[in-house]
Image: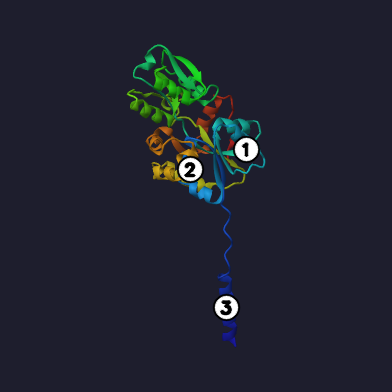
Amino acid sequence: MKIIKWLLLFGLVLSGCTSTPAEPEDTSLNVLCPSGAPTLAFLSSYEEITANGKFDVVDGSDLLVSELSKADSEYDVIVAPINVGAQLLAKGATTYRLDSVLTWGNLYVVGTEGALSGEGTIDLFGEGAVPQKIYETVGLETSLTPTYLSSGQLVQADLLSGQVQAGLLAEPLVTATIQKAQSQGLTLTVLADLQELYSEKTGTTGGYPQAAIFVKEGTDISSLTEKINDFTSNGYPDAQTYLETIGTDTLGLPAAGVVVQSMERQNVRYVKASEVTDQISAFLELFNITFEDSFLNA
């Protein structure tokens, strides 16, 4: 009888150990990201994101501001210019929080050799936005008179037609422009790296914080950011394969070969925002925004 009772008890213990495991948590994420350089941070995680959620790419900042301002936005993660998101945080106009920085500037002056000491104009773009703030902050040594155009593509057109000898461009348009010029028998080169000049001027390192991840409060994105960090800190492994699989048009990028060639100058690098608050604060001061620790994702 004792043996039977023992066997029954042992059976109950075994049945408890082999109970049905709990369902895994839903890890789907909806991501909104501006086209171009910021999308590169997500190359290795794009397939995983889109398997259960979505990854939407947009031009301009209007939709980014609109979604950041919503209390019920469908997006768990919104990538936006750090000054745009911080401005909303300063006004108490968003419930999203600053999690991390993804890009550290990709602005370069491109032109013919010796152009900066010549006469005439230098084409710029981004009036009233980051490009103008950075250009004015670094105090580029040149005798050229600045003229603002409405887009980098117009700057590119002027450079390729010879209407100007120097212009401000962002990667990957820098590389694309230099390559296109070569095919036309024109030699263009990078005359100034505005990220280096900014660091020299401000006493910081690594450029300036530009595109950042803003996360909906209560959303755990540790798995995503770990993957982004691994990809961006290890030389962007298999970048060309990812680009060809996803499609550069989907991400608002030029040909995969151009993108890969320009990766280093695009300065895509994951850094937790809490680790670079001094750099963030200094950059936001250019926009008259006072950084607060409350902006950060806990």
Say whether disc 3 or disc 2 marks the residue closer to the N-terminus: 3
Q: Which residue is denoted by mark 3 in the rendering? A: 11
Q: Is residue 275 above or below residue 282?
A: below
Picture residue at 55% right of the left edge, 25% below the top: 285
Q: In this rendering, does residue 171 appear at all?
A: no
Residue at the location (56% across, 82% down)?
Answer: 7
Tag 2 residue: 42
How far from the left and from the top, in percent, is residue 31?
56, 43
Badge 2, how many Cα within 10 Å: few under 14, some, many 20+? Answer: many
Q: Quadrant of the rendered structure where residue 17 is?
A: bottom right
Rendered location of residue 32, percent (x, y): 56, 40
Upstream in sequence: badge 3 or badge 1: 3
Q: Position of residue 157 (x, y in %)?
A: 44, 23
Query: Is 99 in front, or is 250?
Result: 250
Image quadrant in which the N terminus is located: bottom right
Residue at image mark 1: 67
From the image, state whether disc 3 or disc 2 is nearer to you: 2
